[in-house]
Image (spheres, rainbow, N blue to C red):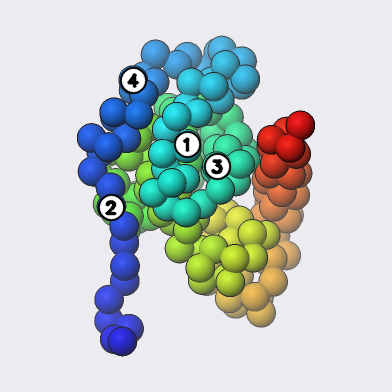
Amino acid sequence: MSNDYQLVLKAPVEHLQAIEPRPSFVKSGSSRGIRKKEFEGLVHAASSLSGVQPELLHAVITVESDYDQNALSPKGALGLMQLMPETARRYGVSNRNDPVENLMGGARYLAYLLDMFNQNTKLAVAAYNAGENAVIRHGYQIPPYRETENYVKKVSALYEQYRKSLVK
C-alpha cells in the first residue's frame, strides 16, 4: 500500500445536522452542564463517524473551549475543538465557526493522532495540544512544556470522570 495517500473520512454535514438541531443558540454564559447537554447528540455522531470515544471528545471540548463554539485563542485557534487554520484545512473544515464542521474536524484529527500513537490517549492528547511533531521530537513522550503537561492532566482527569459517570 502506498504511503502517498492519507485516508480522511468526511461525513456529509447533513448527516450531523439531522442528529439534532444546530446548537447555535447556546450562549457562552450558560453553565457548562447545559452547554455540554446541547452538544451531546453532535458529539455522539462525531464519535460514531470518527471512532473516538465520546467521553474523550467531551474532555477535549471542555478543556479547549468549555463548550463555547465562538472561543478564540490568542494563537488563532477557533471553535469548540479550537482548530488552527491549517488543521481545519487538513480535515476539510471550511468554516471553523460552524460547530458541526469544527467538531467533526477535531474528531477526525484526534482519531488520526490516536492511530499515530497506537491508541495512547495521553500522547494523542499531548499531540492535539503541542502538535504531533513535538511528541515525536521528544521521543514519543509528552513534551516537557508546562502548558502541554497541564493540558494532558486536565483532559485525562475529565476523560476518566466522564467514563466513570457512564458506569453508574
At mark 1, the secondary structure is helix
Label 2 environment density (alpha carbons within 10 Å; few <14, some 14–19, many ≥20): some
Distance from disc 1 to disc 3, alpha carbons, whole Å, reads 6 Å
Q: Amino acid at mark 4?
A: Pro
Q: Which residue was labeled with disc 2? A: 10
Label 3 environment density (alpha carbons within 10 Å; few <14, some 14–19, many ≥20): many
* Above/below status of 129 relative to 81: below
Label 4 environment density (alpha carbons within 10 Å; few <14, some 14–19, many ≥20): few
At mark 3, the secondary structure is helix
Q: Amino acid at mark 3?
A: Pro
* Above/below status of 94 relative to 5: above
Distance from disc 3 to disc 2, alpha carbons, whole Å, reads 18 Å
Distance from disc 4 to disc 2, alpha carbons, whole Å, reads 20 Å
Mark 2 or mark 3, which is nearer the start of the sequence?
A: 2
Distance from disc 1 to disc 2, alpha carbons, whole Å, reads 15 Å
Mark 2 or mark 1, which is nearer the start of the sequence?
A: 2
